[in-house]
Amino acid sequence: MTLKKIPLGGGAGNTVYDQDGGRILVAVHGKNELVSIDPEKLEITQRTSLPGIEDPHGIALDQENHLAFVAGEGNNQLAIVDLQTMKLIGRQSVGKDPDVLAFDAGTKRLYVSAESGQVTVFRESERGLIPEGRVEIPHAHTVSVDPRTHLVYFPLENINGKPILRIMQWAGEGSSAAN
């Protein structure tokens, strides 16, 4: 059952709920925007341009510091957006075809998983991102983090004909994921 169709003006990437802002954020392909939606009125309340980010897709939030991280799969760039002003405050390079992002609030680490299998890891510091390293995990384009254990999970669709879950504990450049 569809409650309402909301025309975004481009393709919808990932969506997240910003609890502090009381809004849904949608990455919009083609328009290179981060769109804010009022979840009660089911209406767009704001469109935020993401200069230097092509075809935004993945989104993760640092609620404590009021930051959104948005990956541009068209040019392998990551935007840092201030959620209070809705302004782009920084950019970083990431692996080819970034897809899903996961932020670990406890360690202040952001994991950017790409279709290419490259996972880029950043540490959030003073409302910016410091690159900590990259690791190759073939077929790893989705990622999730356990906020309690800080383990990073990569569900992989087809490895030698079967799905597997790789689990990583980040220990810096050269960290590896176990089967």
Image (cartoon, rainbow, N blue to C red):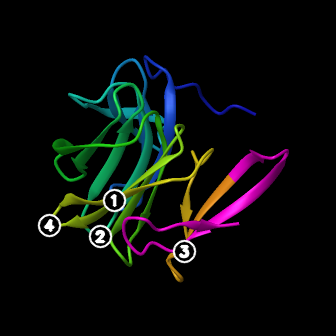
Q: Earlier in the sequence, mark 1 or mark 2?
A: 2
Residue lying at 29% horizontally and 70% vertically, measured from the top left: 64
Q: Earlier in the sequence, mark 3 or mark 4?
A: 4
**Mark 1 = which residue?**
133
Element under disc 1: strand
Nearer the camera: disc 3 or disc 2: 3
Residue lying at 34% horizontally and 27% vertically, measured from the top left: 75
Location of residue 34 in the rendering, given as x and y in whole percent from the top left corner: 34, 35
Nearer the camera: disc 3 or disc 4: 3
Location of residue 27 in the rendering, given as x and y in whole percent from the top left corner: 42, 35
Query: Observer-nearest residue: 153 or 174?
Result: 174
Element under disc 2: loop
Extent of the magenta region: 156-179
**Neighbourhood count class around disc 2 (C-alpha, 10 Å): few under 14, some 14–19, many 20 upward:** few
Residue lying at 33% horizontally and 59% vertically, measured from the top left: 133
Q: On residue 126, which mark appears?
A: 4
The amino acid type of the residue labelled 1 equals: Gly
Q: Is residue 18 left or right of residue 13?
A: left
**Mark 2 = which residue?**
64
* Mark-to-mark CA distance, 1 and 2: 24 Å
* Mark-to-mark CA distance, 3 and 4: 24 Å
Query: Observer-nearest residue: 137 or 73?
Result: 137
Q: On residue 163, which mark appears?
A: none
Q: Earlier in the sequence, mark 3 or mark 2?
A: 2
Location of residue 149 in the rendering, given as x and y in whole percent from the top left corner: 54, 82
**Mark 3 = which residue?**
151
* Mark-to-mark CA distance, 4 and 1: 19 Å
